[in-house]
Structures are given as C-alpha cells and as structure tokens.
Amino acid sequence: MAEATDRPEVHLRMLVPDDAEWVVATDRASATALAREHGWETGKLAAELDEGVWASDDRWAWAVVVDGDPGGFTLVTGLDQPDAEMTVRISPKVRGRGVGREVLRQLADHHFSSNPALNRLTGRAHERNIPMQRVFNAAGFRMEARYRDSFVQPDGNYASEWGYALTRADWELGRHRSGGHGYDLHGLTLELDEVSEGPHMPGLLIRFLQENRRVIARYDADTLLDGELAGILTGDLLRYRFVHTEELADGDSREVTGRGRARIQRREDGRLEIVDQWSDERGQHGRWVLVQPLSEVAGDS
C-alpha cells in the first residue's frame, strides 16, 4: 500500500518570544479559504509569549520542528476543562510527509499524560478540507459532529465544519498510534471511470467516511438519489450493503437494495482505484471501476 517511508523527524517545543516572526509568517503562508489566518502582529505575539499567555493552565502554544527547522505551530486551548481544542498550522513546504499526523499523536501523548483531568482533545476541519480530515482520521481522532454554517468564508457566506475528537480512553488503548487498518478512504470522493459489466451510471460520485475498518459512503448519479452503503474493510477488500432511490422514466421512483464487494488498489499516478462488483435484490449486477479524481490527490499534512 504505497505508504511513504521517508518520514521526517518531528518534535514539539514551547514557543518563545524569538519565534514570533516566523510564526506570523507561517500563519500567513498556510492560511487558505479553508483555514483562516489568526491575524497576529509580530510585536504583540512576542509580548504575549514573553508574558506567558500561551504557556498557562488553560492554553499552550507549541512550535512544530521538522528535521531541525520550524515547520509550523499548534495551539491548544481549554486545558483547564475536560475538553481541550487544538488548532494546527503546518508550513506548506513540509506538507504531504505525515507531519500533521505525528503532531496530533505527540499532542495527545503530552497533554493526556500531563493532565489527568483532561478527557478529550478536539479539533475541527472545514467540510472541504480533505487533507486535514484525513490527518485527524489517521491519528485516531474520530469524526463525531458536523457544525453547520459555523465557518465564515472570505465572501461572507458560511460553510460547515467536521468535528473530531480523541478521548482519554482512545489514547489509553493506543488508537492514536495504531494506524494499521489498511487503506484509508476517509474524506475521499471517487467517480465512475469505467463500466465493464452492467448499466452505465453517468455522474456517479461516491463520498466515503471511515472509522477503523467500518466504512460508510453516500452516493448519487444522474438518475440515482440518496444512495448510502455501509461495510467492513479487510485489507484491500470492502464488503458492503447498499440502498438507494432510482428515478424511473415515467417520473416515478423505487427503492433498491443490494450488496457488493469492492477491491481497492493504487494506480501508478498515486490515485486510489476501486474495482466494484455489485448485485441487487432484482437480480441485476454490475462491475465498475471508480477512481479518485486527480484534483483531489494530495498528501496528508
């Protein structure tokens, strides 16, 4: 499974006043429409760091050091409560190398071990920030909420965010460092690429969520509505059951249920590909190839 082997050396250290300049620069460089800038001013941030504002009982600021050089920063707030919230910013120059995943793991190890009253570490990701969603999932954090219209976008409109959490029980079981359940489909969208058997389904898109081996997905196409599947992923094989609404030529519709087996593999260009064989309760069956769009291929942070 084409996992990267050149993982960088990552560690966390407390931010100090001399870090303010590069922290502000990193914040500006890493901000996007999906992750807003904090808007710090260098002198003010340096003063806050000198006064200990970001090294207190309720909040902490960390420098992310990658192969000996500054690679980002992370903030943890609410440490005086059972739930603490994290914000992670990784410099664009070190993304795609597993840095974000290792940062989340180290944050969990430090804060759960040093604070017995802490029960949950939480974080949010914009609904279209697929790389960050996958980082949370890879570090054992589970998606548990959708915050509707919670993120103000540059144009003034609102977008939703996904909420993730790692509990103390998760941490004690080592789920933040397991990462051994095979392929990770969480947050990915795959589209129909080839039909070798069965009906063609123009416009078919499947959007996946995953928790360990459990996979659910929602899908739709031109004449197919409200589709959902759920299954178990073992190695590279997903066994699932599905249900969807099919629109008929006369304007009516019908509910269709069935089951399938999907084999997951990686193409030479790095995209995930699924070879899907399915059958429904009417006796129809098909064999499709679905592939991750080139526009969505991105390494984790």
Image: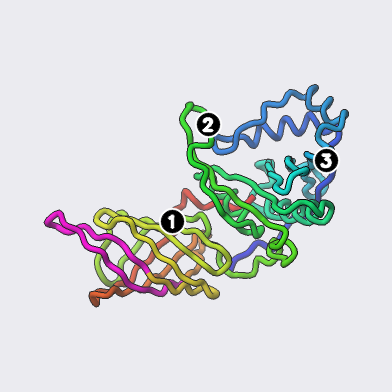
Query: In the image, is residue 166 above or below residue 236?
Result: above
Residue 18 visible in the current orientation: no
Quarter occupied by residue 197: bottom left
Q: Is residue 247 magenta?
A: yes
The kind of secondary structure element at disc 2 is: strand
Closer to the camera, 242 or 286?
A: 242
Q: How far apart are the alpha carbons under marks 1 and 3? A: 40 Å
Whole-percent x, y for residue 63 in the image: 79, 42
Q: Which residues are magenta?
A: 242-263
Q: Which residue is mark 2?
A: 152
Eye-nearest disc, 1 or 3: 3
Specify the amino acid type for callout 2.
Val
Q: Disc 1 or 2, which lies upstream in sequence?
A: 2
Closer to the camera, 122 or 290?
A: 122
Q: Disc 3 or 2, which lies upstream in sequence?
A: 3
Q: Which residue is mark 1?
A: 207
Q: Is residue 4 magenta?
A: no
Q: Which residue is mark 3?
A: 57
Specify the amino acid type for callout 1.
Arg
